[in-house]
Image (spheres, rainbow, N blue to C red):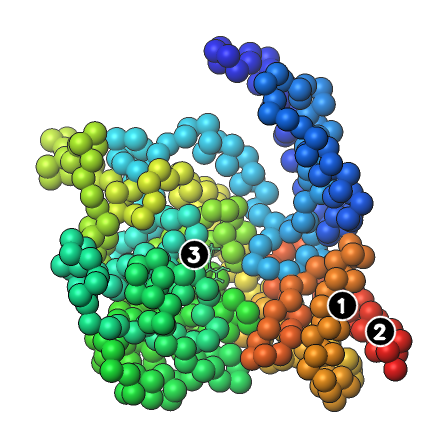
Amino acid sequence: MFGEFGTEEDLRKVADTIYSIITNHYAQLSQGDVFPSDEELIRTMTEVHSTSFPDEPSLSIDNLGDWLWQIRKRSLAVWHSRYVGHMDSGIIPELSFVDAFISALNQNLLAWELSPIATYIEKQVIKWFVGRFGLPQDTAGGTFVSGGTVANLTGLFLALYKRFPNAIREGIRNLAPTAIFATQEIHYSIVKSASILGLGTDSIVSIPTTDSGTIDLNELEKAIDESDRIPLAIIGVAGVTNSGAIDPLSEIGRIAKKEKAWFHVDAAYGGALILSEEHKNKLKGIEQANSITFDPHKWLWFPKSTAMIIVRDQADLQLLDHQASYMPVHPSNVSETGIDKKSLGKQTIQGSRRFDAFRIWYAFQRFGVTPFAQGITRTIELAQQISLYVSQDKRILQLLFEPETNIVCFKINSSIVSSLKQRERLTKLAHERLEASGKGWVSRTIIKNEPVLRMVILNLNTRLDDLKKIVDSLENFLSAEIERRQ
Ligand SMILES: Cc1ncc(COP(=O)(O)O)c(C=O)c1O
C-alpha cells in the first residue's frame, strides 16, 4: 500500500504503539524527574553515538514503544507541574493527534494550488485575531510564520521597505542612516533582524527601562530628539522575555505616529492576553500597531511552531512576493466560479509552510475561548501567590519586582550576600542543584546586571504547592551553601 515503506498492518501497529505512548505520557505528566540525570543522558547518548548510517533497518515495531519511552524520559519535561523554566510548556493534549493529521495531509501553504482549503482556514484564523487585536478588518491581515523570530524579522522588513520601497530593487547601500528604538530588554531576534536586513545592529537605539522593566518613555523621547538618524521603527514589547513586563503601548503608538515611525509590537508572549476579558486591557494601544508578532506556541499551549505576523495592511506583504514561473499567478486571483485563489505563502519570508493554522482552527472550534482565558488568569494568579509567599518571610530569595504577567523573577537578597560575584556564583549553583535534583526547573537570567532566577508559570497542572516546593528547595541549597562558606 505504501510502496517501499511498509504495509497497512505495519501502519496500524505503529499507530497503536505511538497512541499508547502518547496517552501514557499524558497519564503521567508530573511523575518522574523534570530533567534527566547525567548518567541517564550519557547512557542514551552513547547508544545514539554508536550508530552509523543505518543502511539496513534496525528498529523493529516490537521495540518501538521502549525506544520512544526512552526518548521521552531523556527529554526536558516541559509538561511537568514543576517545570517553570522558559516560555515552553505542555500542550493541549488533543493537539498531539491533530498534528499527526496535519502531517498526513502535508499541505503546503506556499500557494493556493498546493493548499486550497488550508489557505482559507489560515486566512480565517488570521482574521479572527485581527479582530481580537482591534486592527481594521477591511485592510489588516497577516500570515502564519515559523516563530516570533521570523515574525519580528517580517515586521522590521516592512518598516524598512515601506519607508524605502526602491531599496527592494536597489538595495540599502545608499540609504540615509536609520534608527530602531527599543528597550535594553528587547528579544535578541530584533537585533538579529537588524543585522539580517543589513541595517546593522548599531541601528538599534537601546532605551533604558523603568524599575518595573518597561520602556522609559522620557528616555525614549529624549533619544529620538537627540538622534540625527531617520526613526525607522519603534518597538513595544508585550511580555518582555526576561520579566513578562508590558510596555506602555498606547504612549509608544502615539510617539511612533508623531515621528512617522513604524510601530511594531512584539507580543510573541503577551499577545495571549487579548483572549482574556479580565487582562486584555494590559494590551491597550496594540490596536495602533503597524505589525504585531504573536506566538500561540508560548502562552496558549499550542505545539511548536504556531506563530503569526499580523499587519495593519495586508497589501504591505506584497513587498515579499516574487514571481516563479512554475507558480502561476491567477490574474485577478478570483476564478470564474468566484473562488479567491490568492496565496498567502508567497507573501512570507519562508518558502514551504506547514498547515499550522489548523491547530488554532481546531482548538478554538473545539473548546471556545473560555479555557484559554481561564488558563491565563490562573497562571497570573499563581505568579502573584508565589510572589507573596517569597515576600512574606525574610528569605535569601527576594522578589525583583511585582509580576505583571505569569513570569516571576527572584534575586539573592543583597543584604545577605553583598558581593555581586558571590550572588552570581550562588545563583548558578542553586540553578544547577535544582536541575540535578530533578525536582523542578527554573531558568536563570540577568536583569540590569543582577543575576536572577526566573519562573515562567505556564503549565496548567502546576499548583501553588509545586511552586513553594521549588522556592523551598532553592532556599535550602542557598542557605546550606552560604553557611558552608562562612
Ligand atoms: C518577546 C519575544 N519575541 C520573540 C521571541 C522569538 O520567538 P521564537 O522563539 O518563536 O522565534 C521570543 C522568544 O522567547 C520572545 O520572548
Q: Is residue 132 left or right of residue 162?
A: right
The residue at which mark 1 appears reads as 430
Q: Is residue 167 above or below residue 334?
A: below
Residue 101 can be seen, yes or no? yes
Query: Where is residue 118 drawn, in percent x and y?
Result: 34, 36
Q: Residues within 10 Å of mark 1 (few under 14, many from 20)?
A: many
Q: In the image, which is nearer the foreground, mark 2 or mark 3? A: 2
The numbered mark, 3 or 1, whose residue comes first in the sequence reads 3
The residue at which mark 2 appears reads as 481
Residue type at the position of mark 3: Gly
Q: Is residue 102 left or right of residue 332?
A: right
Element assignment for label 1: helix
Residue type at the position of mark 2: Glu
Q: Is residue 301 left or right of residue 22?
A: left
Element assignment for label 2: helix
Q: CA distance from mark 1 to mark 2?
A: 9 Å
Element assignment for label 3: helix
Q: Is residue 164 left or right of residue 389?
A: left
